[in-house]
């Protein structure tokens, strides 16, 4: 369990009010829930806490059963950054979802985590909130344990319930405009820059690779992007996929060529913000054809930025 304290430590007697969930994407529904948590905590001079997971429960179960993971809208680092920047929350708790947590009954989860470790007095959750082994725990279990519980009403946008599943569906159709609408921002991925195979550099198109740690990103294809590193914004062209031309296509990668930049950026944290879809990732017959297409992607990205400015 990782506790990230954003504001100074809890004062004696101060109550803790929390919400819990995957918060994949930090979409408009999540956002309004966080705003409500902030308002209730302020009114009661309580501490506000968001509890989430590193590996999401559904990813853990997919790994266990050997099935393909549901794709991710955001990495943990993005959720933490967005929450910390919002200044709406006092503390973020990241639970490590593993075999022993998966086994906990709803009562055990409440007793071990919510009561014993985190000392939570009150929870604000959506009406469909479920937890504990086989997702059998409900709001009624929290109430039975004396945790004051506020049910948060469903947030709709364009008459549709905003959910991470909806955004995943839109992503599978490359509906970036609608995603922006439901998310309230573009999809972005933040992680450390790691070394690739240095092949693109040989073809005059160096790229930065993000460390994805087994995460399967929700977008797939070639995109125009902004990349933020050390507070500087760069224009880029990004491939999200498995590089089928040069690899067996088992590992997901997010790889970006920064237009007109050639500096050593290894080890830095980069945020790749996806702006526009260009084309699907393809398996080419040879490297020359792949890089010819990659040069064209670079030109298409340049055209996008000329049009945008
Ligand atoms: C803009 C862009 C488009 C790309 N398109 C494809 C593609 O369609 N198919 C593919 O197999 N790899 C694609 N790649 C990934 C390349 O295979 C990869 O850049 C190359 O293998 C070199 O990677 P390395 O520098 O990490 O060794 C693309 C990469 C970029 C930056
Ligand atoms: N549109 C919404 N309106 C109100 N509450 C929401 C909405 N979407 C999510 N929540 C609440 O936010 C918390 C975290 O939600 P979580 O990320 O686990 O679900 P989700 O966004 O509905 O994702 P999925 O589609 O994968 O089920 C939960 O308490 C959930 O009920």
Image (spheres, helix red, strand yellow):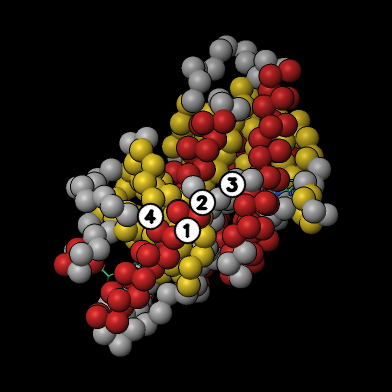
Identify the residue at horizontal 35%, vertical 78% (top origin): 244
Residue farthest along the top direction in this orientation:
12
Q: Mark 2 or 4 closer to N-term?
A: 4
- Marks 2 and 3: which is nearer the front? 2
Out of 122 and 174, give the one closest to the viewer. 174
Q: Mark 1 or 4 closer to N-term?
A: 4
Residue 83 % position (x, y): 54, 35
Gap in angstroms between the C-alphas marked 2 and 3: 17 Å
Q: Which mark is residue 185?
A: 3
Gap in angstroms between the C-alphas marked 3 and 4: 18 Å
Is residue 38 depicted above or below 164 in this figure? above
Q: Do labels 2 and 1 touch, CB within 8 Å?
A: yes
Q: Which mark is residue 308?
A: 2
Q: Do labels 2 and 3 touch, CB within 8 Å?
A: no
Task: Residue under label 4, please give it.
Answer: 236
Kindly state the secondary structure of the residue where label 4 is placed: strand
Identify the residue at horizontal 36%, vertical 71% (top origin): 296
Residue 14 % position (x, y): 62, 16
Residue farthest along the bottom direction in this orientation:
285
Identify the residue at horizontal 68%, vertical 45% (top origin): 28
Q: Mark 2 or 3 closer to N-term?
A: 3
Q: Do labels 3 and 1 touch, CB within 8 Å?
A: no
Out of 182 and 233, give the one closest to the viewer. 233
Gap in angstroms between the C-alphas marked 2 and 4: 14 Å
- Marks 3 and 4: which is nearer the front? 4
Task: Residue under label 1, please give it.
Answer: 304
């Amino acid at each position: 369990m990782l506790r990230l304290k954003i504001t100074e430590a809890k004062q004696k007697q101060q109550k803790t009010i929390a919400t819990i969930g995957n918060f994949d994407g930090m979409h408009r529904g999540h956002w309004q829930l966080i705003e409500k948590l902030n308002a209730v905590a302020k009114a009661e001079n309580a501490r506000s806490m968001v509890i989430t997971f590193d590996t999401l429960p559904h990813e853990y179960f997919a790994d266990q059963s050997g099935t393909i993971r549901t794709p991710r809208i955001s990495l943990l680092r993005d959720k933490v950054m967005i929450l910390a920047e919002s200044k709406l929350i006092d503390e973020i708790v990241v639970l490590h979802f593993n075999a022993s947590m998966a086994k906990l009954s709803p009562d055990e989860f409440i007793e071990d985590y919510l009561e014993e470790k985190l000392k939570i007095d009150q929870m604000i959750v959506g009406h469909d909130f479920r937890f504990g082994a086989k997702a059998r725990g409900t709001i009624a279990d929290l109430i039975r344990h004396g945790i004051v519980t506020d049910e948060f009403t469903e947030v709709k946008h364009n008459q549709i319930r905003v959910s991470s599943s909806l955004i995943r569906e839109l992503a599978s159709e490359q509906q970036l405009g609608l995603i922006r609408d439901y998310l309230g921002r573009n999809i972005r991925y933040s992680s450390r820059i790691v070394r690739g195979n240095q092949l693109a550099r040989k073809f005059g198109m160096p790229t930065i690779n993000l460390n994805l740690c087994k995460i399967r990103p929700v977008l797939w294809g070639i995109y125009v992007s902004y990349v933020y590193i050390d507070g500087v914004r760069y224009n880029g062209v990004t491939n999200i996929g498995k590089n089928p031309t040069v690899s067996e296509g088992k590992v997901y990668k997010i790889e970006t060529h920064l237009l007109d930049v050639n500096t050593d950026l290894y080890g830095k944290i980069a945020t790749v913000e996806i702006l526009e879809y260009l084309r699907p990732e393809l398996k080419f017959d040879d490297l020359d054809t792949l890089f010819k297409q990659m040069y064209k992607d670079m030109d298409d990205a340049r055209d996008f930025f000329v049009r945008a400015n």
